[in-house]
Image (cartoon, helix red, strand yellow):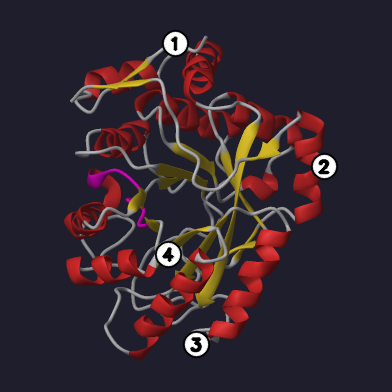
Amino acid sequence: MKSQVQIKRNWTKAEVEQIYHTPILQLILNAADIHRSLHDPQEVQVCTLLSVKTGGCPEDCAYCPQASRYHTDVKAHRLLSNETILDRAKEAKECGSTRFCMGAAWREVKDGREFDRILDVVKEVAEMGMEVCCTLGMLNADQAEKLKNAGLHAYNHNLDTGEKFYDKIIGTRTYQERLATLANVRNAKISVCSGGIIGMGETDEDRIDMLLTLATLPEHPESVPVNALVAVEGTPLEDQKRVPIWDMIRMIATARILMPKAMVRLSAGRVRMSQEEQALCFLAGANSIFAGDKLLTTPNPEQDTDKQLFSLLGLKPRPANKTVGHIHETV
C-alpha cells in the first residue's frame, strides 16, 4: 500500500538547500520513494509542443533564438492557420500525446483577432479529449478567464531562474510580472505550468531560489518543466557549455521532493541525453516528456526514438486528465 505524502508550501531556504545538496544517489532514492507514493512509475505523460507563431519577439531573453534583436537561423512566421494547428493536434494524438501545447512568440497576449483564433483552437483541441496548454507570454485576469472558458487545461509561464539572477538573463520584463501572470492563471482555475532553465551561468543558489519560489506559491504548479539550456548561435548564451547530466538529475529530484504532486517535465536538452541519462531522470522523479522533433525551435528526439526508449524501460503513456491521490496537505 502506498504511504501518504505530506505537501508543504512553507519550505525554508535552508530546507531546500539541504535537500538540493543531498549526496546524489541518496537524493535519487529519496525522490524515487516520493514519486512512487503518488504516481505510477511506469507512466510518463507524452506532450507535444507546437510553435504556432514563431520569431519576431520584442523580448531580450538571452537564451531565446526567437528574439528579434538576435541574429539566429530562426525564421519568423505569423500565427498558423487554425486548420494547420488542428491537423498537428490530431497527428500528436495519433502518435500517443495526451497533452497538446501551443506556443506563440509574443511578449503578452493582446485582445483581438489573433487571440480570438487561439480561443477557437483551444476549444476544438479540448474537444478531442486532449489536455490543451498554451504559452503566449504575459496574461491579464480577463484573458485568463477567456482561456478557461474556452477549455484551456494548463498555461505555461516559466520563471526561468531565481530572482537574483533574473535580470542578467532578461531585461524586458520583471520577475514580479511573471509571478502576476501565474497568479492570474491560478485565479482562473487553470492548471499552472512553471519551471526554468539551467546552464545559463547561474549558481546552485540561483537554482535553489527558483525552486523555493515555485514550492512556496499559494499552490504548487501542477507541472514543473526542467530545461537544460540549448545554446543557440546568435544568442548571448551561444558559448555556454552543456549542463552536466547530474545537475539535471539534482534539479528533477529536488523538484519532485518539494512538489510531490507535480508533473516534473524532462524538457529542453533531452536530445543530447543518452538512454541511460534519461532513465536516471525518470528514476529521480521525471514523469513527462515532450515528443516530436522540435521544442518550439530547438531539436528534440524523434517519435520512434522515444518509442524505443519506452519499450526498453517498460514505460507507457499516462492518460489525459489523470489525478493523484494519497496526499495530506499542509501550508
Question: Dot 3, crowdedness within 10 Å: few (<14), some or many (≥20)?
Answer: few
Per the image, label 2 sits on a secondary structure element best described as helix
Question: Dot 1, crowdedness within 10 Å: few (<14), some or many (≥20)?
Answer: few
Q: Is residue 156 above or below residue 14?
A: below
- The amino acid type of the residue labelled 2 equals Gln
Q: In front: mark 4 or mark 3?
A: 4
- The amino acid type of the residue labelled 4 equals Cys
Image marks 4 and 3: residues in contact by CB distance under 8 Å: no
Question: Taking the image as drawn, is residue 240 in sight?
Answer: yes
Does 29 appear in magenta? no
How many numbered badges does the structure rendering display?
4
Tell me, for residue 134, which label it has, or none.
4
Residue 160's x, y, as percent? Answer: 36, 51
- The amino acid type of the residue labelled 1 equals Ser
Q: Is residue 25 above or below residue 257?
A: above
State the CA–CA distance, disc 2 to disc 3.
35 Å
Q: Quadrant of the C terminus?
A: top left
Q: Earlier in the sequence, mark 4 or mark 1?
A: 1
State the CA–CA distance, disc 4 to disc 2.
28 Å
Residue 101's x, y, as percent? Answer: 51, 62
State the CA–CA distance, disc 1 to disc 3.
50 Å
Question: Taking the image as drawn, is residue 74 in sight?
Answer: no
State the CA–CA distance, disc 4 to disc 3.
16 Å
- The amino acid type of the residue labelled 3 equals Arg
Question: Dot 4, crowdedness within 10 Å: few (<14), some or many (≥20)?
Answer: many
Q: Earlier in the sequence, mark 4 or mark 3?
A: 3
Tell me, for residue 3, which label it has, or none.
1
Per the image, label 4 sits on a secondary structure element best described as strand
Q: What is the span of residues highlighted in magenta in the rendered image?
A: 156-163
x 81%, y 32%: residue: 312
Dominant secondary structure of the residues highlighted in magenta in the image: loop
Circle 3 residue? 78
